[in-house]
Structures are given as structure tokens and as C-alpha cells.
Image (cartoon, rainbow, N blue to C red):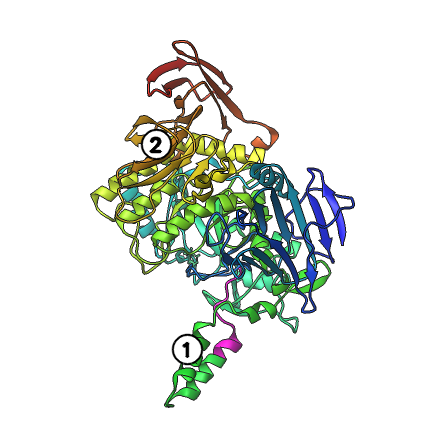
Amino acid sequence: MKTFILENGVKVFQYGEPIDTDAVYAEKLKQKFDEKLKPSFKEDGKAIINIELEKEDMVYGLGGNLGGINKRGRVYQSYCTDEPSHTEEKTTLYGAHNFFIVSGKTHCGYFIDFPSRIKYDVGFSTLDSFNIEIFGQDFNLYVIEGETLEEISSKFLQIIGKPYVPPKWGFGYFQSRWGYKNKEEVLEVYNTFKENKIPLEGIYLDLDYMDNFKDFSISKERFDGFKDFVEKLKKDGTYLIPIIDAGVKVEKGYDVYEEGIKGDHFCKDKDGKPYTAAVWPGQVHFPDFFKEDTQKWFGSKYKLLTKSGIEGVWNDMNEPAIFYDQKSIDEAINSAIESKGKNMDVFSFFDLKDKFANLANKDEYYKSFYHQVGNTMKSNDEVHNLYGHYMTKSANIGLKKLLDDKRFVLISRASSIGMHKYGGIWTGDNCSFWSHLDQNIKNMPSLNMCGFFYTGADTGGFGNDCYGEMLVRWLQFSVFTPLLRNHSAIGCQNQEPYVFGKEVKENSKNLIKARYRLLPYIYSEYMKSVNNYKLMFKPLSFEYEDELAKQAEDQLFLGNELMIAPVHKPNHKGRYVYLPQKMVEVSFKGDCESLAVKDCGIHYLSYELEDFKFFLRKNSIIPHINPAMNVKHLSQETLKIIAYVDSEAEYNLYDDDGISHQYQQGNSFNTNIKITRGNDDFIIEVDNSNPSIKEIEFTIIDSSNNIKNKKIKL
Ligand code: GLC
């Protein structure tokens, strides 16, 4: 074991010879420490860590997993998996996010930097024991100490580096569906949004746009004139975002396949031949994204899209998902043939059924293909969680080059910590279930803790049928999430905001408009979180230590100003909300708002489908503007302010060009607003460097519910 310290005091315990996982970039300085957690190394090649849990201990983090904000009482596994059924007993999903904080009388954060399977039993088998099984003995364990939960999460964000920043248009509303089968159908979606004056930033293109599921191909038959189509929509500020899958179709004459073979870019089987498995197009090879020249090669292929005007993509099936391999499907088919005409008892019937049902994503597939990692070959299983990570790195390298200094939208399904630098993630194939809306709420702070800021769930749910009430309730929450995308699966009920009748259409439209009203705040909070290593979404317990705050699993702080408390159950007209401090209930009504001061404590919040509500914290300020049809048409000439001032409130509104990477050189605008309560009036101080803001309209409320309106010309 070797020990190191990082600049910000994080301690590192290195066991064995870990692989570089691209997660932590901070420099390691040699220093001697005692072990805080002493792993035991087993003969079967695993390492076990055991943490005793006190009754009051809570466990935070672990990113995009199922379960609560407090992770106790469940089993989780880090092993990126294409898991389309997010039912309660599932332990693996798409991400491998190995950072967590144990918090009780004291707080301590841990990051296990290891690219293969880790199993976390957080007080599930034994109430007071947190058992961690690492499927290997070469790893780095980072121990992050601090006085507060915020300090620990901030120190962790510092060592993994700043998250990916999309362009400002990436914060708009996106429509998506697997099954918009041609240009005409996509155009119809665009036109229907326009006719109904519902804001729309862009449309995600699912695999329907490809020619026979081939990466970097566009169907001539269904998407003829692609470039003109992309450019026409973009003129109006509407972006198309096509999908790219990890597997490359095996087909003679197909350029990507031919180049991949010629350049030796594909993963190998045990005999050194390109590994073949089946996904959408049938047989595919998987690019070996561990090789730098493969990253560059695959990244350069995005040119087919960027040359048509595309500025955003989504990387999918990059766990990588495998439907079957030839050996397994042949075995299943042979068993079926052998069983033909036989009287099958319960055991033989289930045996046969399972042979087909369990074909996808078998463990044995991941042990049977290899990556070149430095000078050695490693099975995919050994470095499994880095596959989607490196695919997204490859896309990032490619897009950066192809689009010069322009920012792009890039999201991935699979991820591990470190990938947060290259792109965002969506939370995978959820369903139109109320419990999945609830999960979306719980995931946001956990994902933030692991570095994933540009994230959100498929609004309305991907699988199963959505209905009007659910879509509206989902939007009431997801209009706060940086990635806002309504996406659904082929064969399910369509779920565009206009398909569920007039009432749902109007309610959805108002919610999407509310997103655009709040966009300056959402963007500002995103950028400040990135720049200052702060969480954008925080559990209440990160600031308040009382029991009600600790148990508030469906309320979140957004920035330092807002608390959000969405309704996530059917047939409800409101919900109970816990206010750990005095706040103002803000209700958006069309382009206006109503405000009411609420004392701390538990309140019943009336929250109907036509409402949009959130809470503004004491001595806080939020900016908003008039909504528009998309970011291109937004104007912040008149900036509006809602402030709850008891004594003094201050807000710094961050802004930048929203397009380039110039913000990295500090090229940004700041509008600093300070409001102080004087004897009989409010004193307003504004320090503004943003030329696009010409006037500011203030609505200020005090603790006695007195409201003052003011206007300042700049
Ligand atoms: C995967 C993706 C989903 C997409 C589908 C078809 O299931 O997670 O978002 O719609 O593939 O490409």
C-alpha cells in the first residue's frame, strides 16, 4: 500500500497497481498516513471494506442508482448495465459512480477508483454494517475529510475536475421519441409545437434516422436532404440531436466497418480477431475506445453529422449493451429444437424460457472480449465501467475539433466518474411510472455529488404509456433539471405535450414557458456550480440537521435560493412540505407571479395541475425574464427580480456568450444585485457588466408580506 495526499488535503491509499481511470486529475504528493478503512484482501481476488454504521448515520452519493437520497437499506452495484426495467430489486444501472459520504456525528467521503464491479451492501444484510465488495485488488481509495457535507462534496468535485458545459441552448426544452420514422414526422412535431406556440429548443433523432442501424449513416429514403433540413430548423433556433450507438455494423463495404478493420480499431476476442456480438443491426464490432488512436478515429467520424450542421449528439448502448452472441443464441435455439414435441415439466420449461430471456448482457460476454490498455490486453470485465466513458471522451475530442471553439450538446447513457468532464448523462430507460418521477427527484443531488451536472431523466417516462396528469407533474419537476428532454419508446403512447387534450397542452406549455422564464437563473446556477465546485441540487440535510430535513427525500434546494417540492403522486391536489426556515411560496401565473411568506414548519401546499410553484428562501433573490420560443429568441433586456428580503439579500447573476469556451478564460458577465432593508424602504445596489440587460424590474417581499415594486434603468 502506498499513501499520498492531494493539494486540497484528500488522502489517497493505493492498493496494488491500479489502472489509470481518467477520474482524478489532481497531483499526488507522497505522504504517510494510517489507514482509515482497512480493506481485507481475499484469496478469490476480491477486496472487502467494512464500515460500521451508527444508528443515525446516513449514506449519500453513489450517483445514478435506484433508491433514496439516503442510500441505507439497499444493495447497489457499479457495473454499467443496459437495464431497461428499473424495478425495486435491481442493483445495477447504467453508471458506475463510486463516490459516497458517510454522515453522522462526523462526515467522511470516499471514492473507490476502480473500473470493474463493486458491490455495496448499505445496511441491507446487516442493519449496522456497510459492506463493500471490490472485485479486484488494484484500486485507489480516496478519503475526503471535512467539517460539513458541502465541504466534502466540494473537495471531491475539485479533485475530479470541472464538469462538462453545454451551450446555453442545451438548457432549452427538447422533444424526443424512438419512432419518429422520417423527416416528415419530425417536421410535423416541429410544426405542431409552432402552431401551438409551445417553446421548443430541439428534437432528438433516435436510430430511425440511420440507414439500417449503421453509425454515421443517414437514411436516404427517410431523411433525404438531411443538411437542408437541419439548417432550415436551425435558422429558427431549433436543433436536431442524432443518436450514435457503440456497436459498428459488420458489413462489407460499409466505410466505418472497413476503416475500423483496416485501422485495427475493434475489440478483440481471445484469438485476437475482432469480437462479434449482436445489437440493433445484428452483428457488430465494438470500437476499442481504450486506444487513443481509436478515440481519435471514431471522434472524427462525427463529421458526417457536423458537416450537415449538427451540434449535438447522444451516445447510446455504450455499457456496451449486447443482445446476444452467436454461441448463446445457438445454444438457446438448439435447446428449443431438442425440446420440440417433448412433455416439458416445470424445470425444463423454465430452463428453456430462461435460455432466451437471459440472452442479453450476460456476464460471460464481458469476460470474452479484450481492450488494449497501455501495453497489455485487459478483458472488458476488468475495465468494464470505462467503456461508455471513453466512447464519450472520443466524441468530445471529435466534436471539439469539428466545431472549432463552439460548445456542443453531448450526452451518454453509460458513464463512470471522470466522464463528467466530457458530456452529460440521461438516466436511461425509465418508465412512465410515478415511482420513476420520484426517482428522478432523488437522483439529482446524488448525481451532482459524483460530478454529473448536465443530467435529467426521460420526462414523462421512456417505457410504458404516459398520460396527461403524469406528463404535467413530471414537467413541474423537470423544468428545473439542466437536461430537459421528453422521450418515449416506440410502441408506447405518444407523449408530446399536445397529445393529451387542451388542458394538458396549456399546462405543459405554461411549464415549458416557466423554464424559459427561469433560464437565466438555471444557467447561472449551473455555471457557478461548475466554476465553484458546488452542488446545484442539494438535499435539505446538507444545510439543516433536524430530523425532518434529514428525511425530506422529495424536496431539494436548487442553488442557494430555491427549494423545490414537486407533486409526484397521482390524483393529488397538493402535498405536505417541510420548510426548515421561513420562505416565500412563489407561484407563476402566466407571465406574472404571486408571493406569500410561509413560516418554518410543515405546510399543506395546494398544487394543482395548472400551477407552477417553488419556494424562495429568506434573504434570497432570483432573476427571471420573459419567455420565448427558444434560447435564440430570448431577451434579457428587461431583467425581472423576485426577492424575499428580511434584512439583506444578494445575488450574482452569471452569464456568458453561451456558445464558445471563452468562459474558461474568464470572459463572462456578472450582474450583482444587493437589496438591503432600510428604515422605510429597500436600498438597491446593482453592479452590472452584462450589456444585454437594459433595465431591471423588482418585486420585493418582506417577512410581513409587504410587496414593493421598483424599476431601474441601467
Ligand atoms: C435505448 C436508449 C433509448 C433509445 C433506444 C433506441 O434503449 O436508452 O433512449 O430510444 O435505445 O435507440
User: How far across and down, in percent of the image, does residue 386 sit?
Assistant: 60, 56
Q: Residue at x 48, y 76 (%)?
A: 329
Residue 283 visible at all:
no
589 vs 216, left or right, is: left
Give the mark toward the camera: 1 or 2: 1
Q: Residues within 10 Å of mark 2 (few under 14, many from 20)?
A: many
Examine the structure image and report whether residue 320 is included in the region drawn in magenta. yes
51 vs 511, left or right, is: right
Question: Which residue corresponds to mark 2?
Answer: 628
Above or below residue 471? Residue 345 is below
Q: Residue furthest top?
A: 679
Above or below residue 171? Residue 281 is below
Label 1 secondary element: helix
What is the quadrant of the C terminus in the image? top left
In this view, the residue in front, 560 or 191, is 560
- Amino acid type of the residue that numbered disc 1 sits on in the rendered structure: Lys
* Residues rendered magenta in the picture: 319-330
Precedes in sequence: disc 1 or disc 2? 1
Residue 664 visible at all:
yes
Label 2 secondary element: loop
Q: Are marks 1 and 2 in contact (CB under 8 Å)?
A: no
- Amino acid type of the residue that numbered disc 2 sits on in the rendered structure: Ala
522 vs 165, left or right, is: left
- Place residue 627 in its image quadrant: top left
315 vs 598, left or right, is: right
In this view, the residue in front, 373 or 179, is 373
Question: Which residue corresponds to mark 1?
Answer: 353
The quarter of the rendering in which ligand 1 is drawn is bottom left
Above or below residue 81? Residue 553 is above
